[in-house]
Structures are given as C-alpha cells and as structure tokens.
Image (cartoon, rainbow, N blue to C red):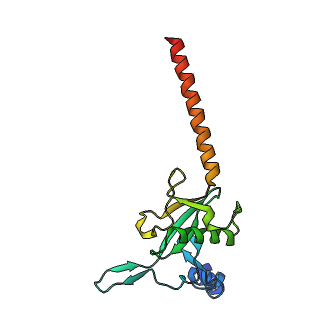
Amino acid sequence: MISRSSSSRRSRDYGSTSANRSLQIFPQERHTDLVRRQGGLISVPRTLSSAPLMVPVTDGTQKMTKLLLKVHIEGSLGPVHVVLPPESSVSDLIKAATQIHVKEKRRPLLKESDPNSFELHYSQFSLESLRPEEKLINLGSRNFFLCSRLPASSANARNSDEAEKASQFHLSLTKLMEYLL
C-alpha cells in the first residue's frame, strides 16, 4: 500500500501557492478598483490603480506618486482608505472619501453626499478644520477625521448660548464668594 503525504494532495487539489488562490478569488479583470494590501483590500480610483508607487527622478532619488490616507468618518466604525496623488488638495480627499463611503454602502449612511457639506480635521479632538486648498503632501499626517459642517447660523447661536451660560455661572460663583466672606 502506497501512502501519499497530505501536503502533496493539498497542492494538487488547491493549487501550489496561496498567491494562486487569492488570484482565483479576486481576479484583477473584474475588480480593477480593488487593490490587495497587507491589511486587506482597499478601494482605489480606477485612474490610480495601475500607476507605480514611486517614480525615479533624474538625480537618483525617488518621488512619491501616491499616498495612502485613512479618513475616519463621524459615526463610522472604521476608517476609509483612500489612495490619491500627493498634489491633491483637501477638497479632493473629502470628495474621494465620501464617494468611497457611499459606494461601499457603509453605515451610518451619509445625509448628504455633497463634499462641500463636510470638514476635514486632523482628529476628532481638533477644533480647527483644514483649508480645502491645502495640498496633502504638506499636511504632515496621513490620518484624518471627516465630520459634517455646521451651518453658520446654528454655530453662532450655539456659541452665544455657551457664552451666556458661562457668564451666568461666573455670576453665581461671584455671589457665592460674597456670601462666604
């Protein structure tokens, strides 16, 4: 009786390498906007899916042609991975992130898909939003937080309410100090 090793049966039945299996599962012809990276599949705009990551420059150095950026959307569980050229602006990143979020049907669903109704911040704790005309290569970070923009009238009303509450609190503390003295 001749026994075969289980590894030879496995390689014959399922292909010789795990790379072949992944190519069989996700053929590049059907999913040209999906790119396999170490963390899994990420969505890439079709115009960038075939471009190289680095391009040699005449002086021997290499220049980046794409940036992988993570954008956390307000209320969403995980970040949206976006690949853009370094010459892109913040407004391009907002537009790409909202398009990917809508295309992948992520939760929570966005009330508006208009990129002008969103602001990009360095983190959820950052109060100042990034200017839409800033270039991505000059920002110094690859992780961002996207939140909906407040209308100017409601922001002013909220600020005036907070100022009024603070002044009332200050007056009550003053009265308490007078009473204690």
How many marks overall?
0
Residue 117: x and y in percent read 63, 62
- Residue 4: x and y in percent read 62, 83
Percent position (x, y) of residue 171? 55, 24
26 sits left or right of 170 in the view: right
Position above or below: 6 against 138: below
- Residue at the image point whose x is 63% and y is 55% from the top: 151
**Nearer to us in this view, 75 or 41:** 75
Q: Residue at x 59, y 70 (%)?
A: 95
Using the image as rendered, state which of residue 56 and residue 118 is in the foreground: 118
Whether residue 66 is visible here, answered yes or no, is yes
Q: Residue furthest bottom?
A: 29
Q: Position of residue 121 (x, y in %)?
A: 52, 58
Q: Which of the image's four quarters has the N terminus?
A: bottom right
In the rendered structure, the answer to whether residue 111 lies left or right of residue 166 reads: right
- 148 is higher (above) or lower (below) than 100: above
Residue at figure coordinates x 61%, y 49% from the top left: 155
Residue 1 visible in the picture? no
Q: 3 or 107: nearer the eye?
A: 107
Residue for point 64% across, 49% down: 154
Answer with the quarter of the image where residue 139 lies: bottom left
Question: Would you place residue 55 above or below residue 148 in this image?
Answer: below
Residue sitting farthest toward the left: 59
Which quadrant of the structure image shows residue 73? bottom right
